[in-house]
Image: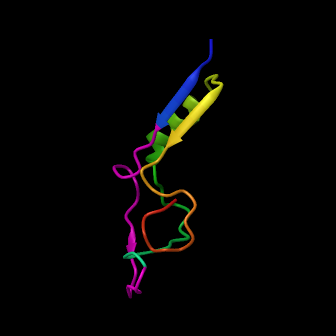
């Protein structure tokens, strides 16, 4: 048979704090981007779980996130 894997990410509980933008521009959210490589969206335990889960065989994978994956600098939550 076919194997479907659905992975639901928790992008709020274990993530690093967000930086608030010094000035909120019209049409943009309240957050500033960060280049800090030590920050995380998932936390160590969830990254480990995700890595191990992706090693399991599946014909179809659905990776679900509660926030946008490929935004273009709008100032809201994003990866």
Residue 58 x/y as whole percent? 63, 24
Please say if 8 is above or below 60: below
Apparent side of residue 30 relative to residue 42 in the rendered image (left or right): left
Image point 49% across, 58% down: which residue? 68
Residue 34: image location, x then y, percent: 51, 71
Q: Quadrant of residue 70?
A: bottom right
Q: Position of residue 59 (x, y in %)?
A: 66, 25
Residue sitting farthest toward the top: 1
The chosen color scheme is rainbow
The magenta segment is 8-27
User: Magenta part mainly helix, strand or loop?
Assistant: loop
15 displayed left or right of 36: left
Q: How many numbered discs?
A: 0
Front residue of this view, candidates 3 and 9? 3
Residue under the image location 38 percent in, 85 percent down: 24
- Asked whether, in this view, residue 61 is left or right of residue 28, the answer is right
Quarter where residue 1 is shown? top right
Q: Is residue 63 above or below residue 56?
A: below
Is 63 or 36 nearer to us in this picture?
63
Instruction: Determine the residue positioned at 61% across, 24% down.
Output: 56
Residue depicted at 49% across the width and 74% down the height: 74
Give the percent coordinates (x, y) of residue 22.
38, 86
**Of 55 and 45, which appears nearest the observer?**
55
Q: Is residue 53 magenta?
A: no
Q: Is residue 26 magenta?
A: yes
As drawn, the residue found furthest toward the left would be: 13
């Amino acid at each position: 048979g076919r194997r479907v894997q659905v992975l639901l990410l928790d992008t709020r509980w274990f993530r690093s704090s967000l930086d608030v933008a010094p000035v909120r521009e019209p049409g943009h959210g309240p957050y500033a981007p960060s280049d800090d490589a030590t920050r995380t969206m998932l936390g160590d335990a969830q990254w480990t779980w995700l890595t191990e889960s992706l090693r399991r065989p599946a014909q179809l994978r659905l990776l679900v996130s509660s926030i946008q994956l490929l935004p273009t600098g709008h100032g809201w939550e994003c990866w």
